[in-house]
Image (cartoon, rainbow, N blue to C red):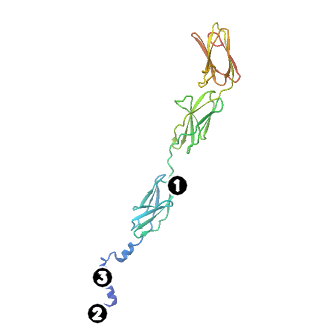
Amino acid sequence: MKKLITILGIAGFLMILGLAFIGCDGGSSGGLAGDLGDARPPVAPTNVRATVNSSTSITISWDPVPNTTTYYVYPVTGNRASTTTTSHTFTGLSPSTEYTYSVSANNSSGESPRSASVSATTSEAAATLPPAPAGVSALATSSSSITVSWNAVSGATRYHIYRNTQTSGNFPRVGTVSDTSFVDSGLAAGTRYYYRVTSVNSAGEGPNSSRVDATTQIGPRNGTVTLTNIASSYVTVWFYANAPHYENFTSGSGYSMIDVFAGASFTWTDLPTGIPLTISVSRGNISDERTFTLSPEQSRTFTWNGDIFQ
């Protein structure tokens, strides 16, 4: 051995030892240098991008990183997500909100630095029909107007008001407003009106509110009507208010009935004003009637001649 070292010299001997070491390691590929390279953490992901999917979802994706087993996706707030692919989708987000993310790569040797951050803003939420207005009320403010009001509906841009004189059937639309009240004018005195209200937004018109009603006011009860019978026989007279809600008119049933004898007169006093009234007479197969409205303190006289009113 000493002779071999002497002949080859120290440098040659070291060369032989190196070749022997490489052979024992299983060949010339890999080796110590390769082992050292595999032991390093991966580099940070690049080309990170954010894609908005909807008002509640964003997908983060990136280019693959060599020697990586797992990727971590970090939102600015909240817990990180892990994946073995090159993308991850976040769901359950808030509409119209900006979110920011970064990504790191990981292997058995550790985690890379985080990538550059990317941001994206979720889209607006799809509009849905608004609910029916709540707190709807109706208040008669005069003999010809009623004010309808309700609570504001979030997201509503306008409101439709519908009216009817019956509790069911078709309710024609009588107004559209952006406020939370509507004054319905030009109404008949002493008449009950029924209302429904709907709210409207970009998605359309919502359902009807609950039905409410109010009765327009009547004028003071100071009208007077006199019937004079100039016929040769008595006549039966019905005198009633046309407003269907009107009670306790004279007889307690919304009308008054009386026989007026030949040559006699009868006068009704303290009649309601501002609403339609009807006087009707009959005798056998002959009848006639008149419908009219009294102004405050007005007096009217009707004459019956046996065939018609004069």
**Quadrant of the rendering where the N terminus is positioned:** bottom left
| Mark toward the start of the polypeptide (1 vs 2) | 2
Compute the Cα span from label 1 to label 2.
82 Å
Dot 2: few (<14), some (14–19), or many (≥20) neighbours within 10 Å? few
Dot 1: few (<14), some (14–19), or many (≥20) neighbours within 10 Å? few
**Residue in front for this viewpoint, 10 or 251:** 251
Residue 194 in percent (x, y) is at: 57, 31
Residue 157 in percent (x, y) is at: 57, 43
Residue tagged by mark 1? Answer: 97
- Locate residue 229: give its quadrant: top right
291, above or below 44, in the image: above
- Residue 130: mark in rendering: none
User: Would you say the residues marked 2 and 3 are in contact, meaning their CB atoms lie under 8 Å apart?
Assistant: no
| Mark toward the start of the polypeptide (2 vs 3) | 2
Compute the Cα span from label 2 to label 3.
20 Å
Answer with left or right where residue 138 lies relative to residue 11.
right
Residue tagged by mark 2? Answer: 3
Which amino acid is tagged 2?
A: Lys
**Residue in front for this viewpoint, 251 or 134:** 251
- Residue 20: mark in rendering: 3
Which amino acid is tagged 3?
A: Ala
Residue 180 in percent (x, y) is at: 60, 40
283, above or below 206, in the image: above
Circle 3: element type: helix
Can residue 2 be seen by looking at this rendering? Answer: yes
